[in-house]
Image (spheres, rainbow, N blue to C red):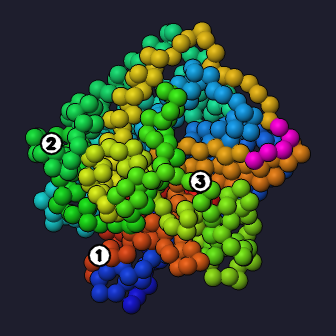
Amino acid sequence: MSRLVVGPFNRVEGDLEVKLDVAGGWVRSAEVVSPLYRGFEQILHGKLPQDALVYAPRICGICSVSQSIAAARALAEAQGLGVAANGRLAIDLIHATENVADHLTHFYLFFMPDFAREAYAGEPWHQAATSRFRALSGTAAEEVLPARAQWMHMMGILAGHWPHTLGIRPGGSTRAVTANEQARMAGIVGAFRRFLERTLFADTLERVASLSTADELASWREEKPAPQGDFRHFLAISEALGLDRLGRAGSLFMSYGAYHAAGGHLFRRGLWKAGCPTPLDLSLITEDTENAWYAPAERPLPPTSGETVPGDGTGKGYTWCKAPRLAGEAVEVGAIARQLVNGHPLIRDLVGSGSGNVHARVVARVLEVALVVTAMESWIRDLRPGEAFCEHGSTPADGECTGLTEAARGSLGHWLKVRNGRIANYQIIAPTTWNFSPRDRNGNPGPLELALEGAPVRAGETEPLAVQHIVRSFDPCMVCTVH
């Protein structure tokens, strides 16, 4: 058996290293390393509770809105504060804008460029994939980057700027939208819909969203040539490489529930366990630091009493990422989890009662673009200019509260404890913390570590193609992983 260290990864937000034990051309085991320590949880200790609204968005420049929402929801819970109807719509629109941009960026700039690698030069589809998806110089970038830039104008209207907007508050949004701005947003979303229907799907959003089985998806792909619509292009390559057999992790998926415009969730909260929906009990969440570079703990701790104290380097840890677990089990989060929990028939058919895979993860993200952009059109129509966008309250001197949301990459939670008017503890579990967690004290690997087991390694490969596809299928945001 030989040891192969892959990293640092390009086209990944933050620092990532993967250590692989390889034998017989296959990965036998993996250790996923988050080498960068951030310290945000210690920075927040002793601060005023409302300071979390300033610090939390700066955890990440890609999903800063998700961090803002989690912090605001924690404070809203502490204050017993409701959210103004307009504010709820505005926050969902801000959040959806960021999440859709993340999905689009992942597909075009992070994931698809791997198919332009020279190692695939012998494949019949390689030349077309290289022309279309080569990083920055492919023809896709010429269309996607301007479309994404126009899409992000939504942030200017709703939030003033992006990233690190300060407009999201416990009771709503500080940026009231006028009727003219409402019409302008409708125009931006309409133009983006036309881009998606012309370039990504070569079909309507409604048609894509209605696909319900793997067979239907395959039939839809065959209706037009593979290069006609970039999603079809992916599906053709995925079939040729067997990406549905690559990167299988566990069978437990979690969603905290996404988007609240209608008072409930657009994508519901819960678990999908071995092919069955199950209620989510948040009290079962703990964090294990047995194999991380933190001070030793006698047992896994719930986030409300969690500790983030760096160790002295003498332990057996191999990463700064903690190992969050739900009732002792590793959990996969992300678009695939949201759609399994919410009951989308296509994703449930692609996964069945088994585990996720590279193909299903990418399909879930692209599907979610169609679902969310369609929902945004109705949210814009529901705005009522001239009515309140924010309610106001005050944080008590003592209390414990939780703020949950769904970032593009999955479930994000902030756990806050206030004593004598100051933050006594602030713990964050980000999506990539769940997916890229190390082994726990019982030796159980995290989702990515498990997904890497069995990945093929070609002779002479130092950056195995299969490993690249598996890692990117989780769309890691490493700067969010460690706080």
Q: Which residues are magenta?
A: 396-400
Cα–Cα span, label 3 and label 1: 37 Å
- Secondary structure, mark 2, is helix
Image x and y of residue 480, in percent: 58, 54
Mark 2 lies on residue: 220
* Mark 2 surroundings: few (<14), some (14-19) or many (≥20) residues within 10 A: some
Task: Write the residue at 72% across / 76% down.
Answer: 298
- Secondary structure, mark 3, is helix
Name which residue type carries label 2. Answer: Trp
Mark 1 lies on residue: 456
Label 3 vs label 1, nearer the camera? 3
- Secondary structure, mark 1, is loop
Can you name the residue that lies furthest to the bottom here?
A: 1
Cα–Cα span, label 2 and label 1: 30 Å
Residue 113 visible to an observer of this rendering: no
Image x and y of residue 116, in percent: 27, 57
| Above or below 104: residue 426 | below
Mark 3 lies on residue: 282
Name which residue type carries label 3. Answer: Leu
**Side of 283 relative to 231 (left or right):** right
| Above or below 405: residue 40 | below
Image x and y of residue 175, in percent: 62, 21
Task: Name the image quarter holding the N terminus.
Answer: bottom left
Q: Earlier in the sequence, mark 3 or mark 1?
A: 3
Label 2 vs label 3, nearer the camera? 3
Q: Is 388 or 401 nearer to us in this picture?
A: 401
Label 2 vs label 1, nearer the camera? 2
| Above or below 181: residue 147 | below
